[in-house]
Image (cartoon, rainbow, N blue to C red):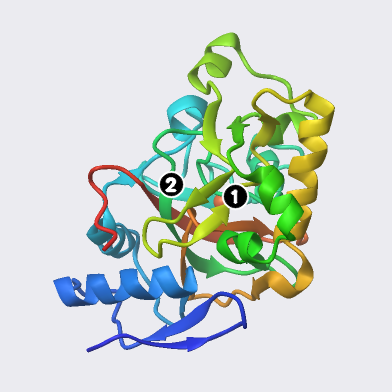
Amino acid sequence: MSLTCTPLHPVLGAQAHGIDLTQPLSAQQVSAINAAMNQYAVLVFRGQALTASQQIHWMSHFGEIDIGLKRVFKRPERLGDERLIDISNVNAQGQVDRRDSPKNLSNFANQLWHSDSSFMKPRAAYSLLHCLITPSWGGNTEFADLRHAYDTLDKRTRRDAEGLQAEHYALHTRLLLGDEAYTDEQKKALAPVVWPLVDTHPGSGRKLLFVGAHARQIIGWPTAESRMFLQDLLEHATQHDHVYAHEWQPGDTVIWDNRSTLHRGRRYDISERREMRRTTINDDEHAHLT
Ligand SMILES: [Fe+2]
């Protein structure tokens, strides 16, 4: 079978057809998917239920699966394999979790525009989210293309952003949400990293504006000025016309490139069960992204 894509939005995102996610991929299929990712940044596969091991196996075609923040948080998890990130409001005992639980705190942090693991080196390349159970209302995931954000910047702002470096900190989003209960050990394990504000996407060669909720400081700038500039750029990148909003159905699989996009979850009724599984690969020497 060969991959075909139908665009879902004028800027980014396409629905992918012709790939059975339960089957191993040929080298040609891997490169076709990478080429489509370089073009559309977000690919949507509809109506293919995946087991946990099928999801891990499929994602492994593109690199080694990373466990992200689990290195630091080490919370009890209900999904057996640590390579699966449980994007749900369900606790380790299988019950919908308390409104004020750490699990829901992570869910709220996911509702800020971000690129997965931008606070780490290496950062995330692809993330894949597979949908199992949707709530009756809300819970979309929205995506914005950072290359389009760069292309549509006015000349003056583009010149101002060029050559700057921004510090990304994992706990910045948590602190914004009023969560400060971290040990010194955790804080040290999550030391901030620095990325160029204007970067080049390796797959497409296009320039991009690497912003997001983890970016807290432009190196060498006063904090207030730097946070306002980052906020302005984030607003520009995520303006309504630039955003593809994915409405989930059980059996959906969405894969995106964290190096060229931002995403955020949208509000839903957290007393209703929502279950998704994420797998992520990093932009490192194990990645197969061409
Ligand atoms: Fe995310």
Say which quarter of the image contains residue 270: bottom right
Viewer-nearest residue: 224 or 49: 224
Q: Which mark is residue 79?
A: none
Left or right: 208 as drawn, with respect to 172: left
Inspect the image, locate mark 2, and give the three-letter code of the amino acid beneath it: Ala
Disc 1: CA contacts within 10 A as few (<14), some (14-19) or many (>=20)? many
Image side of residue 179 versus residue 3, left or right: right
Q: Position of residue 257 (x, y in %)?
A: 46, 59
Q: Position of residue 207 (x, y in %)?
A: 51, 57
Q: Secondary structure at mark 2?
A: strand
Label 2 Cα neighbours within 10 Å, binned few <14 / some 14-19 / many ≥20 = many
Label annotation for residue 90: 1
> Which quarter of the figure has residue 34?
bottom left
Q: Secondary structure at mark 1?
A: loop
Q: Is residue 168 visible?
A: yes
State how many labels appear: 2
**Left or right of 16 in this view: 171:** right
- Which circle, 2 or 1, is nearer the viewer? 2
- The answer to which quarter of the image holds residue 178 is top right
Residue 179, above or below 283: above
Residue 205 appears at what percent x and percent y?
41, 61
Q: Are marks 2 and 1 in contact (CB under 8 Å)?
A: no
Kind of residue sitting beneath label 1: Val
Residue drawn 52% across and 41% down? 118
Q: Quadrant of the C terminus?
A: bottom left
User: Residue sitting at 80 percent across and 49 percent down?
Assistant: 232
Q: Is residue 96 left or right of residue 84?
A: right
Query: In this view, which residue lies farthest toward the top?
Result: 184
Identify the residue position indicated by label 2 in the image.
124
Residue that appears at 68% across and 52% down: 158
- 274 or 113: nearer the eye? 113
